[in-house]
């Protein structure tokens, strides 16, 4: 019976070690969190049809978010009243994907310029704030539609940022 050549054990061990190192390195880089901009044509109302998914994120300072599908009318725009002081505003249009890095701690409000009217809004919470602070007042101060403000309130309430 012919002897089948066996893979040298030391080479196998070396391969296993480099594979383990690779996994650790990838975990350390922390891939961006993905937010999809959804158009659900099966929805029976505009409120459900146009959404950011998920509509709330909690990340650490320096964390990155990849916004996908800022096309066919969807955009990603900062809500000025819900944006930490000094943080650069964002405006993404006509791009299948765009990565945004959030450095400053705080609560960031984001809207789609076309569908924000129907409540296509979301929050990004960077760091761990003690609470929403004056979030409720700031939501009321926005020039968004009532539907968008209601959506922001419900997101904030569901995540403990508002009582
Ligand atoms: Cu949209």
Image (cartoon, grey):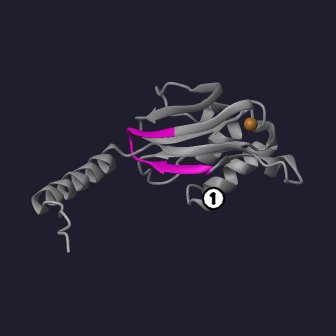
Give the camera-side residue of 95 and 8.
8
- In which quadrant will I find the C terminus? bottom right
Q: Residue furthest left?
A: 10
| 1 relative position to 108: left or right | left
From this view, report whether residue 7 is shown above or below residue 97.
below
Q: Secondary structure at mark 1?
A: helix
From this view, report whether residue 115 is shown above or below residue 158.
above
* Residue under the point 26% across and 49% down: 22
Query: According to the image, label 1 marks what residue?
Result: 157
Q: Which image quadrant is residue 34 in?
A: top right
From this view, report whether residue 155 is shown above or below residue 52.
below
Q: How many marks?
A: 1
Ligand 1 sits in quadrant: top right
Magenta span has 64?
A: yes
Q: Residue furthest front?
A: 1
* Residue under the point 78% across and 31% down: 114
Rate crowding at label 1 as few (under 14), some (14 to 19) or many (20 or more) other CA atoms within 10 Å: some
Place of residue 91 in the rendered image (x, y in percent of width and height, measured from the top left): 61, 25
Place of residue 153 in the rendered image (x, y in percent of width and height, measured from the top left): 68, 52
Task: Report the span colored magenta.
Answer: 54-65
| 146 relative position to 6: left or right | right
Magenta span has 22?
A: no
From this view, report whether residue 132 is shown above or below residue 69.
below
* Residue under the point 61% across and 38% down: 68
* Residue under the point 58% across and 50% down: 56
- In which quadrant will I find the N terminus? bottom left
Give the camera-side residue of 27 and 62.
27
Place of residue 69 in the rendered image (x, y in percent of width and height, measured from the top left): 66, 36
Give the camera-side residue of 11 and 137.
11
Place of residue 83 in the rendered image (x, y in percent of width and height, measured from the top left): 55, 33
Answer yes or no: disc 1 within 8 Å of ligand 1.
no
């Amino acid at each position: 019976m012919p002897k089948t050549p066996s893979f040298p054990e030391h080479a196998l061990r070396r391969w296993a070690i480099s594979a383990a190192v690779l996994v650790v390195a990838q975990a350390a880089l922390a891939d961006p969190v993905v937010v999809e901009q959804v158009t659900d044509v099966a929805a029976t109302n505009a409120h459900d049809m146009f959404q950011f998914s998920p509509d709330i994120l909690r990340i650490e300072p320096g964390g990155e978010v990849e916004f996908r599908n800022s096309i066919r009318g969807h955009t990603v725009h900062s809500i000025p009243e819900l944006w930490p002081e000094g943080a650069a505003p964002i405006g993404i249009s006509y791009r299948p994907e765009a990565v945004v890095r959030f450095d400053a701690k705080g609560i960031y409000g984001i809207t789609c310029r076309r569908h924000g009217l129907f409540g296509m809004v979301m929050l990004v919470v960077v760091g761990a704030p003690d609470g929403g602070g004056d979030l409720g007042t700031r939501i009321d101060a926005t020039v968004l539609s009532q539907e968008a403000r209601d959506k922001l309130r419900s997101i904030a309430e569901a995540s403990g940022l508002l009582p």
